[in-house]
Structure formats: structure tokens, C-alpha cells
Image: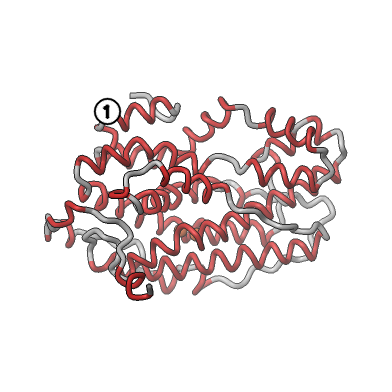
Amino acid sequence: MYRELALSDLVQVRSRRQKAAAADLARYESAFGRWDDRASVRRNPRRLLGAPAGDAVYFPPELFPAATHQLVVDKGPDVVRRLLVCRLYDYLNFTTELEEIAVMPVAGKISRGRAGIDLPEHMRADAFKSVTDEAWHAQFSDDLARQVEVHTGVPRGRFGMPAFAGRLDGIRVGMPDAVHGLEGLLFAIVSETLVSGILADIPRDERLPAAVRDLVRDHAEDEGRHHVYFRTLLRHLWPALDTEQRQAVGPLLPEIVFAFLEPDYLSVGRSLRACGCTAAEAEQVLFESWPTDRVVRDTARAAEPVLRYFGRVGALDDPGTAEAFTAAGLWSA
Ligand SMILES: [Fe+2]
Ligand SMILES: [Fe+2]
């Protein structure tokens, strides 16, 4: 079993037999050139939560529609405040889970030369730096959640399985064996090129405790480098796939995008219940806060960068893939 684990590649890319051109492998501009000076794990201190002001906001309500739903607002400012603390817990837990389940295993395989595609040698070296960054992000997110719990007295409760894990399982079930593994690699590419954009405004939002803003800024700065890295990874991956593989996995790309960006309804429902909503109230708030057209609109806007990258590598040239993106409401030709 361990031998098998050690030798297994992330993806089985048949056309790999056609070795990538030496020129392609030589042309790599590392975004990690000054990693030792710039990486958060090297440069920044542990972010410590001071005693926040009584009116501190722990998550911007404008980014969390449930907190501005009338049914929740009518329950009073304490319930809203508590719900925003829960939203921060969910964000921090999501970050920890994403790094550990979805990103570090992919970057780890690349670092060991087990991606299954030809990559520039320096990309392997940079993958180690990415794994280190992500382990730090997972750790500091968990650490801050513990501090918030102590300061606010709002219990973190039990977290369930993050929604993206179940969604990826669902996608994998429908895939031919020959392309298994690509869902994980593409999910890492999608999440790593979109994660820095999601909370770009938080570091500037002075209603939030400084430790929360600083931590999100630390993360975003590292993710700027990861964004460039995973965009480059897509440039190497897509041409390495043969037509059959592209046709098999291309139409699944919209689902992979939704797997990352769509709200985790179960986790929001748990938070609403923990803040005193009945099951029926929680369901109503969920239903009215995230109508389908809003979810599609928000997802399409957030996904724009990765759609551009898919376009550049030619993924949208496949009619089945283009049709899937159009049907999902994420793209119009
Ligand atoms: Fe990260
Ligand atoms: Fe990252």
C-alpha cells in the first residue's frame, strides 16, 4: 500500500508519452523568487486578537445575506452579531479544510514529481513552498477561531464535512476512470486562482478586529503567488490532455467552479439554528437569501478570472464544454 501510494501519480495523462517540449519546460517564471522575504510564514507574527470593542463586527454583513435577512434582524443585534461570529468560524474552518483536503495534497504530489504531467523542474521546488504556505494558512485560521471563541464566548460547535468535499465526490462518480484525479487537480486550480478575490475587501474593513483583517491580508498576499503558480499549472495541464480527456472533463468544469464558490448551505443552516432560529426559520432564511439567480450571478462574477484562463488554454473551444458553461449561466459566447 505505501509503495503504491509513493508511486501513484495525481492524474493519468495518456498523452504524456508525448513529452512536453523542452522549450515549454524551460520557460517558467517563478512567482516565489523572494519567498524567504515575503511568505507570511517567514515574515509575519502570529495574529493576536486584542479585546475587541463591544460593537466589533466579525464578518461584513454585506457579504453574508443571512445576516441582513429581516427574520434575523428582527431577532435583535445580539443575534446578528452572533451569526456573524459563526460566519467567521465557517470561513476559517473552510480555509483550514480547503488547504488540508484539497490544496496541500495536490501541491505535495507536484513537489514529489508525481503530478502525472511534465512540469518545469522549478515548479516542483515551488510546490514545496506552496505546501508550507498552505499549512501555515490552515494553522493560523484554526488558531484565530480559537481566539475568537475565547473573546466572544460564542461556541464554535461541531463542523460538518465541508460542502466542496461532497460536491467533488459527486463529480468524480460521473467521471470515466481514465480521468479520475483530474477533478482534484482542476479544483485546486479553480480554488487557487479564485480564493484571493473572494475576500479582497476585508483587510480594509475597519469595523473588523485588526487580527481578522491582518490574517486575511496575510493569506491574500501569499495567495497572489499561488494564483500565478496555478494559472501556470493550467497552461501545462491542458495541452497535456488528449482530445478524449478534454471532452470528458471539460463539461465538468462548471460543476467544479460551483463546488468551490456555491455557499455551504448546511453550514449556514447550522449557524442559524445555533443562533436561535427554528428549523423552518432557518430554511426560509436560506431559501430567500440565496435564490438560484443570485447564486448563479455571484458565481459567474467571482469565476471570471478562471474562465479567462480556461479560454486562453482553449478549453472553451470544445463545444460540449462551452455548452456546459453556458447552460450553467457562467458564460456567454
Ligand atoms: Fe492558502
Ligand atoms: Fe494557496
Above or below: residue 128 compared with residue 66: below
Residue visible at 69% across and 34% down? 286
Q: Quadrant of residue 154?
A: bottom right
Q: Quadrant of residue 113?
A: bottom left
Of the 4 image quadrants, the one containing the C terminus is: top left
The image position of residue 283, as x and y in percent, is 73, 33
Residue visible at 82% across and 50% down? 55
State the residue in front, 150 or 183.
Answer: 183
Q: Dot 1 corresponds to which residue? A: 319
The image position of residue 259, as x and y in percent, is 49, 43
123 on left or right of 307: left
State the residue in front, 135 or 220.
Answer: 135
7 on left or right of 139: left
The image position of residue 198, as x and y in percent, is 53, 45
Q: Is mark 1 within 8 Å of ligand 2?
A: no
Above or below: residue 24 compared with residue 63: below
Q: Amino acid at mark 1?
A: Pro
The image position of residue 282, as x and y in percent, is 76, 36
State the residue in front, 260 or 27.
Answer: 260
Residue visible at 25% across and 47% down? 238
Above or below: residue 197 compared with residue 254: below
